[in-house]
Image: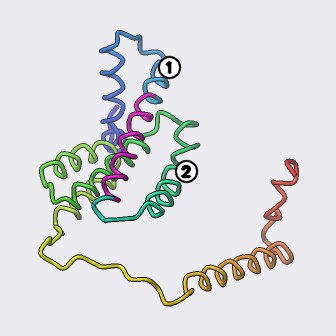
Amino acid sequence: EWDAYYLQRVFPPLVVHYGLRFLGLPFTSPNIIFGFSILHVLLLTLSALAWSLICNRMEINHIGKLVGCLGIFGSFALTKWASYYPVLTDVSAFTISIWMLYFYLVNNKVFLILLTTAGAFTWPILIYEGAFFLLFQRDESEKRFQPSHAPRHLNTWLALATSVALLFGLFWVIASPPLEFPVLPYQPLLPIS
């Protein structure tokens, strides 16, 4: 039975279905999971390429590329979640989304429309993202943003102040947990310490 939930996520399973059919593999659970895993590897590789192109387009330096790469591709959602539940469409949605961002930045409406259409059958929110990108096109005639450096050591002091505030907040939560919180925040980690 088809309903809106499945219709909005039908594209990645169709890719796996026809991939298995092309390879002549039977539609068993292990083969389907393997098909999704291979699809995820390919999509994450394409996503890394898109991230590199976005960084080049936005003139992000090598440190920014590395930090962004670690933040995106080192996240729980892409490193663990996708491997625990390979048949979900999260990685497909992420890949379509990051490529939509790239094609928005380069003002390529054709690929943006194609990805919005594919996204409508991959993840419910992607059709809105694509519509947003299509409605609010970039104006290349505007003066490009020229980043400037923060005043002397301001970034260092802000990072230090934020770290100290977070550290004090952590100590406060550990020292005086709320009464309705049944488990101390560090209690699940005790067996591995």
Badge 2 amino acid = Gly
| Residue depicted at 77% across the width and 80% down the height | 168
Q: Is residue 168 above or below residue 80?
A: below
Image spot of residue 116 (x, y percent): 22, 50
**Which residue bears the numbered disc 1?**
29
Image spot of residue 175 (x, y percent): 86, 76
Q: Earlier in the sequence, mark 2 or mark 1?
A: 1
Q: Residues within 10 Å of mark 2 (few under 14, many from 20)?
A: few
Q: Quadrant of the N terminus?
A: top left
CB atoms of marks 2 and 1 within 8 Å: no
Does residue 163 appear to the left or right of 31 in the view shown? right
| Residue depicted at 44% across the width and 60% down the height | 62
Image spot of residue 171 (x, y percent): 81, 76
Name the foreground residue: 98 vs 178: 98
Does residue 170 appear to the left or right of 111 in the view shown? right
Identify the magenta region: 38-55
Does residue 16 appear to the left or right of 78 in the view shown? left
